[in-house]
Amino acid sequence: MTAPTSDLILERMMALHPKIIDLTLDRMLRLLAALGNPQDKLPPVIHIAGTNGKGSTQAMIRAGLEAAGKTVHAYTSPHLARFHERIRLAGELISEDALTAVLDECYAANGGENITYFEITTCAALLAFSRTPADYTLLEVGLGGRLDATNVITNPAATVITPVDLDHQQYLGETLPEIAGEKAGIIKRRVPCIVGPQQEDGLAVIEAVAARNMAPLSVYGQHWHASREAGRMIYQDEQGLLDLPLPILPGLHQVQNAGGAIATLRALGFDAAACEGAVTNAQWPARMQRLKTGPLVKAAGQAELWLDGGHNPAAGVALATVLDELPKVPTYLICGMLNTKDIKGYLRPLAPHVTALHAVSIPGEAATLPAATTAQAAQAVGMTAAEAPDVATALQSIIGQDPQARVLICGSLYLAGNILRSNG
């Protein structure tokens, strides 16, 4: 009999709970206890929550730690092309054999009980981390924070809260303070918390939670500052000033994300070399990523091809800022989104920077917004828009009109993942 692959086990895991998302920690704690509580045997943990910038911030913290010669575990979600991307063991993506083994062990230990896909796969990641030596563990929250499956670490080395905005309101609350309260649920007693740029009412909630937990805060605009000046990144805190290269990840918002990463590294005692490594060595796909190879790039000819997975209004603002800073070239969007997102809020800031939008449905996603609905939303915010059956067709239509255009495929990490798989 052929041994099961990770894909087969993951498919079985999808059937263990009737809901994709069901926020509670009870099932996590039950399974972790059956596995010997691997969450208590990890290298020092840096736990990262927030609405926007979690992945980029984590990537920069990892780059900084690795520049300092440290080995780092990292957990992130969702994956783009392959599930293995979610679990990085001591700097390397988990192997197929290792992933299959921990998934199988978790599936058996669960004994057929109800548990969500994200919960049981998070248990598998924690189990893998607990068995592989490393200097640090980076855990990115999946959704929210307080009841997220990653929030089983009782004494992390640091917590990080990136910018909080409206997203996933059906799970986290309708108002910014409610959502900020969920994100602040990762704050632990007396553990330092680094806080990125926040809206005032969200920050007030974070500060209140930190005060109850006697957690020292390092807050953007109060304790640390990050800005772009004369083509450089200037970071300043109570320890002094750093004059650094601009982050390799493009956009003004990445300067602020880099600031959060540097504040974290400084809180942990790392030097300027680690901080420079954070901004110069970080890699994070589908965040305003220029595609340079593959079948789609070949099909694009002389056109620029970019990819971004941002999907909420704040991401739309950040993307608009990046587009505004690029050389002025006719810019076309190929956009597909999930039906849970605020599509008009995402597209509205992009409208002044875009020649036209081609709307697509996300292949293989039951929750995709139909292309027709995306096109209608684009028209409602002032864009010229049309539907396309798929990305390749949309691309051919665009370059047929404008062979030297800039084409940005955007709107969802799920669409970005589909592009990375098909263009690999």
Image (cartoon, rainbow, N blue to C red):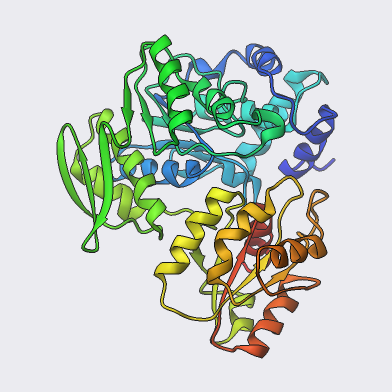
Position of 349 compared to 295: left or right? Answer: left
Q: Residue at x 41, y 59 (%)?
A: 251
Q: Quadrant of residue 45?
A: top left
Residue 300, position in %: x, y? 61, 82
Residue 193 vertical placement versus 188 (above, below): below
Task: Name the quadrant of the N terminus.
Answer: top right
Q: Residue furthest left?
A: 240
123, 328: nearer the viewer: 328
Residue 346, position in %: x, y? 61, 54
Q: Residue at x 36, y 46 (%)?
A: 256
21, 162: nearer the viewer: 162
Residue 187, position in %: x, y? 45, 20
Position of 78 compared to 164: left or right? Answer: right
Task: Name the quadrant of the C terminus.
Answer: bottom right
Is any part of residue 149 visible from this angle? yes
Position of 421 compared to 115: left or right? Answer: left
Q: Residue at x 82, y 28 (%)?
A: 16
Is any part of residue 412 visible from this angle? no
Q: Residue at x 52, y 20 (%)?
A: 185
417, 9: nearer the viewer: 417
